[in-house]
């Protein structure tokens, strides 16, 4: 275990130099007058009061204005229900998330629960560093509602060697990967048809950019990376003859025949890079794409000054900022080649895990289970205090209450991706986008899982090489994939650097492990 942590610390130092994540974290500190007195919970085998366990839950983002007030209520409800758990959230700014979290894990900092983004850093990556606690017994003992509301095939995706190391958040249909949002109102304004190919998309975008009346151009903006699942440039893959395939763990192309290749050496990567290069040279991509922060990407969506979003986003309020006549039907979902298969690259997209140094793994599981124990619990964590932050709108709807002292936004709103579950989620029926709701939150009966969806790669035997290629790819491959550098000119030298860093050895190890995994699945 110590060797794993030493490896992690080296990786953190290398990655932090490349990522350059700035800014101080906004840890919330202790909240005043938290609920949950020590006599509220009963110990399991005696009638004596059990001491309330305080846990720290680390999440990406910025602490909201009314967080302390809401979680005071959460802790009061946990105490009243006899759970014996009190929760404090620790917020880390999104752009410093990887660097700060990795440092906390490597140094053994005291916390009990943290958020997992599978399409950014899968839970298997933390497992391979020796950073995750085995929570199987805790789930079996205290996870009644988790098992009730998370389907088995999704929960199984959080297992390694038959043991649970994460709790999935069943908040989204992963077969939504491969679609993108487009502004129908903008199409009409420019007398354009919905694009059916990447070429038509670029052509339409050029016209929109030329005619745009807003104060800021509707650029394609995103955090820079070379992973199409993270960037949702997987929308292009449906147009390739080799589809269905996915890219696992950033580096590995895997098709449904079980063939594994080095992603950056495929023709598909080259095609993606050519598309991104055309976007960049035609001024469609934000010129600062390599240094874009997640907050900037979100701000553009919130401003309503966008035309296409790879993935889903936007709401009626943002649309009406530059088009007061817009309706919720003015954001549409587009699939290239919609007749093709719908593929889930992962069985779940987000979740939560317990760090191996946690002193209270069972308490962390109890809290996650409690969220799903009732609609009342779920509503409090996700939507805040009824009458102050939201009102109910029928069985499944809600209306947010905006706070004039908080930029006219609710003082509190939870995160569906962190703790959401489609069985209990509410929707803003007036402002949310119907097409997005259908794609994201309704099961797709025609979807299939990638053959590698639940495969977990263990880089222990190639850890030096794996660390090296992660660092080298961030520096050499990302500018090519984002279109800033021309593939034909930059790729040969970049590939040589990747080979020297150990790419071939890592890919060979991945292929070996995946073949063993497939053989075990066939038994």
Image (tube, helix red, strand yellow):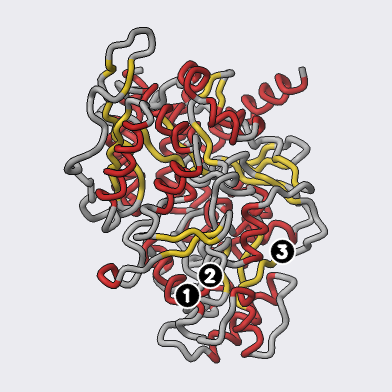
240 lies left or right of 156: right
**Foreground: 9 or 389?**
389
Mark 2–mark 3 distance (CA, rounded to whole Å): 23 Å
Badge 1 element: helix
**Foreground: 328 or 16?**
328
**Badge 2 is on which residue?**
431
Mark 3–mark 1 distance (CA, rounded to whole Å): 25 Å
**Foreground: 395 or 372?**
395
Q: Are marks 3 and 1 in contact (CB under 8 Å)?
A: no
- The tag earlier along the polypeptide, 2 or 3, is 3
Q: Which image quarter is the C terminus in?
A: top right
Image spot of residue 163 (x, y percent): 54, 19
Checking the image for residue 430, the label placed there is: none
**Badge 3 is on which residue?**
335
Badge 2 element: loop
At a point 42% along the width and 27% down the height, the residue shown is 366
Q: Are marks 1 and 2 in contact (CB under 8 Å)?
A: yes
Q: Quadrant of residue 191?
A: bottom right
Mark 1–mark 2 distance (CA, rounded to whole Å): 7 Å
272 lies left or right of 92: right
């Amino acid at each position: 275990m110590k060797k794993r942590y030493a490896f992690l610390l080296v990786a953190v130092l290398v990655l932090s130099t490349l990522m350059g994540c700035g800014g101080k974290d906004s840890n919330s500190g202790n909240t005043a007058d938290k609920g949950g007195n020590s006599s509220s919970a009963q110990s399991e085998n005696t009638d004596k009061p059990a001491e309330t366990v305080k846990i720290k839950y680390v999440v990406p983002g910025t602490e909201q204005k009314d967080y302390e007030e809401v979680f005071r209520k959460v802790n009061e409800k946990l105490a009243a229900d006899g759970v014996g758990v009190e929760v404090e959230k620790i917020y880390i700014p999104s752009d410093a998330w990887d660097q700060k979290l990795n440092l906390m894990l490597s140094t053994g900092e005291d916390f009990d629960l943290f958020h997992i983004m599978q399409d950014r850093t899968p839970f298997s990556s933390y497992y391979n560093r020796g950073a995750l606690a085995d929570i199987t017994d805790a789930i079996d003992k205290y996870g009644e509602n988790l098992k009730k509301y998370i389907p088995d095939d999704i929960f199984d995706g959080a297992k390694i060697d038959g043991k649970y190391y994460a709790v999935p958040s069943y908040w989204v249909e992963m077969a939504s990967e491969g679609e993108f949002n487009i502004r129908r109102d903008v199409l009409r304004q420019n007398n354009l048809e919905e694009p059916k190919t990447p070429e038509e998309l670029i052509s339409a975008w050029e016209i929109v950019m030329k005619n745009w009346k807003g104060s800021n151009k509707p650029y394609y903006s995103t955090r820079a990376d070379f992973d199409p699942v993270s960037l949702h440039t997987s929308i292009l893959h449906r147009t390739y003859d080799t589809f269905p395939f996915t890219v696992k763990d950033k580096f590995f192309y895997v098709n449904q025949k079980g063939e594994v290749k080095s992603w950056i050496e495929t023709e598909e990567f080259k095609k993606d890079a050519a598309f991104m290069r055309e976007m960049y040279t035609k001024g469609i991509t934000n010129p600062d794409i390599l240094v874009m922060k997640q907050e900037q990407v979100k701000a553009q969506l919130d401003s309503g000054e966008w035309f296409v979003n790879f993935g889903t986003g936007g709401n009626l309020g943002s649309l009406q900022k530059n088009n007061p006549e817009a309706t919720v039907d003015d954001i549409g979902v587009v699939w290239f080649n919609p007749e093709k298969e719908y593929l889930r690259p992962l069985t779940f997209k987000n979740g939560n895990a317990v760090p191996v140094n946690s002193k209270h793994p069972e308490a962390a599981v109890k809290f996650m289970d409690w969220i799903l124990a009732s609609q009342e619990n779920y509503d409090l964590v996700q939507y805040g205090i009824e009458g102050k932050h939201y009102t109910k709108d029928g069985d499944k709807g809600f209306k947010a209450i905006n706070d004039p002292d908080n930029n006219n936004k609710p003082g509190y709103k939870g995160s569906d991706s962190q703790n959401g579950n489609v069985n209990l989620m509410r929707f803003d029926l007036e402002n949310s986008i119907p097409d997005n709701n259908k794609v994201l939150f309704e099961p797709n009966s025609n979807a299939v899982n990638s053959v590698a969806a639940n495969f977990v790669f263990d880089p222990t035997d190639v850890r030096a090489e794996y660390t090296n290629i992660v660092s080298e790819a961030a520096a050499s491959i990302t500018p090519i994939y984002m279109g800033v550098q021309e593939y034909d000119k930059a790729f040969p030298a970049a590939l040589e650097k990747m080979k020297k860093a150990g790419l071939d050895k890592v890919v060979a190890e991945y292929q070996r492990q995946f073949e063993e995994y497939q053989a075990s699945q066939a038994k």
